[in-house]
Amino acid sequence: MPPKVRFSREEIRDTAYDIVREHGAVSLTARSLADRLGVSTSPIFTAFSNMDDVLASVRDLAVSEMDQKISLSVWQSQSFKGLGLSLLDFALSERNLFSVIFTGDVSLSEKLSQTKVQAIRLVMADEDLSETEADFVFSHFLVFILGLCFIDPAGKTVHREDMLDSEYWSLISCVKQHKAANTAPSGYGASHTNIGWEESG
């Protein structure tokens, strides 16, 4: 009897990741994964409880790689524009992974944990904002970028850098105006009162 082929959880995940990256999540099945590994489906379900578990591990890896790439871009460019351009480029060059990332139930802000820390520190230093105010700018800027990613998946927007600059400065202006008036910006969130906004400033 030939020796039983063994694969680690990471090896199976990485192979699944390649399938999703090349062909999309719809192509990831137990059979396609087993065929790529050159084994039966048994090793897959020894390491994972089901295919949803496999896809979740692929999503976690994709999120980690996206976060690292964008975080590096923010650090190198020292600008929110770098954050926007890097996320737009990732969405364009890694469409299948980008699609998988945003099928989960975790918010974009939570997924970009490394990026969020760097970006918030950057805007706090550059614009003299509190952490709460910088978080507001970061979160709303991400919503704007995500909108661009889905509205223009082919990356044909000519003036996207100007659009990112305009949105960033609009958010900064909004925060500073409300800071001067001692009020919280509209859409800041039901859990944040004006007092909470004032105390964080």
Image (cartoon, grey):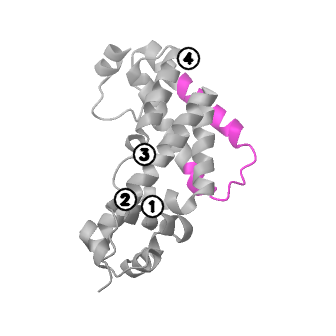
- Which of the marked residues, 4 or 3, is nearer the chain's N terminus? 3
Q: Disc 1 marks which amino acid?
A: Val
Q: How many labels does the image show?
A: 4
Label 1 element class: helix
Q: Residue 131 carries which label?
A: none
Q: Disc 3 marks which amino acid?
A: Leu
- Which of the marked residues, 2 or 3, is nearer the chain's N terminus? 2
- Which of the marked residues, 2 or 4, is nearer the chain's N terminus? 2
Q: Which mark is residue 126?
A: 4
Label 2 element class: helix
Q: Disc 2 marks which amino acid?
A: Glu
Residue placed farthest to the bottom in the image?
1
- Asked if residue 43 lies left or right of residue 97, the reply is left
Q: Which mark is residue 10?
A: 2
The crowding category of the residue bearing disc 3, from other C-alpha atoms within 10 Å (few below 14, some 14 to 19, many at least 20), is some
Asked where in the image residue 33 lies, by quadrant, the reply is bottom left
On the image, the x and y values in percent for residue 19 come to 49, 69
- Label the magenta part by its dominant secondary structure: helix
- Which numbered mark, 2 or 1, is in the foreground of this view? 2
Asked whether the beta carbons under mark 2 and mark 3 sit within 8 Å of each other, the answer is no
In the rendered structure, which segment of residues is drawn in magenta?
Answer: 147-173
On the image, the x and y values in percent for residue 197 come to 35, 20
Q: Which mark is residue 108?
A: 3
CA gap, disc 4 to disc 1? 34 Å
Residue placed farthest to the right in the image?
158
- Which numbered mark, 1 or 3, is in the foreground of this view? 1
Q: Which mark is residue 100?
A: 1
Please tell me which residue is depicted at 44% across the width and 50% down the height of the picture: 63
- Which numbered mark, 2 or 4, is in the foreground of this view? 2
CA gap, disc 2 to disc 4? 41 Å
| 125 in magenta | no
Please tell me which residue is depicted at 30% across the width and 21% down the height of the picture: 196
